[in-house]
Amino acid sequence: MSLYYLQKFIYDLNRDPRKREQFESDLDGLLSDYVLDDEELEALKAPDVGKLYVLGVNGQLLMHYAAMHKYEWPEYMEAMREGVRQYGPVRAGLYAMVGD
């Protein structure tokens, strides 16, 4: 997993209008600029906000990505909860769930 590049992709997309345009017109070309594994690519393309959350994407970054995909706030929150139900605990990053 390449959490750094996954978050960098979303950060760049959130901040750069040209990246958002390329996202719409040439997603594969845009994604080729980042070192991402198959699971990350699949979650980005879906878009699967819950999976991205479980993979460790920071919520501040993820909420803008979700909004770009027309998620309303309650849908965004539920997508993260559903991600944990479906894929298990957050695996990495700030929100990684730790045991006792």
Image (tube, rainbow, N blue to C red):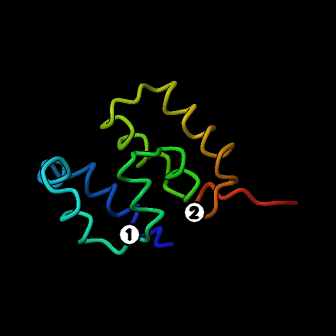
Q: Nearer the viewer, mark 2 or mark 1?
A: 1
Quadrant location of the C terminus in the rendered image = bottom right
Question: How many numbered discs sit on the rendered protein?
Answer: 2
Query: Residue 63, percent across and down?
Result: 42, 40
Q: Which residue is drawn at 33% across and 36% down?
A: 69
Q: Which residue is drawn at 64% across and 55% down?
A: 90
Which corner quadrant of the image does residue 91 belong to?
bottom right
Disc 1: CA contacts within 10 A as few (<14), some (14-19) or many (>=20): some
Q: In the visual, does 69 lie left or right of 63?
A: left
Asked whether the residues under the numbered discs 2 and 1 touch, taking CB atoms below 8 Å apart as contact, a structural biologist would say no
- Label 2 SS: loop
Of residues 13 and 33, the one drawn nearer to the viewer in this rendering? 33
Query: Residue 11, percent across and down?
Result: 32, 56
Q: Name the residue under label 1.
A: 5
Q: What residue type is labelled 1?
A: Tyr
Disc 2: CA contacts within 10 A as few (<14), some (14-19) or many (>=20): some
Q: Residue at x 17, y 47 (%)?
A: 24
Q: Residue at x 69, y 54 (%)?
A: 89
Q: How far apart are marks 2 and 1 (CA)?
A: 12 Å
Q: Which of marks 2 and 1 is nearer the N terminus?
A: 1
Is residue 36 placed above or below 73 in the rendered structure?
A: below
Q: Which amino acid does label 2 sit on?
A: Gly
Q: Name the residue under label 2.
A: 93
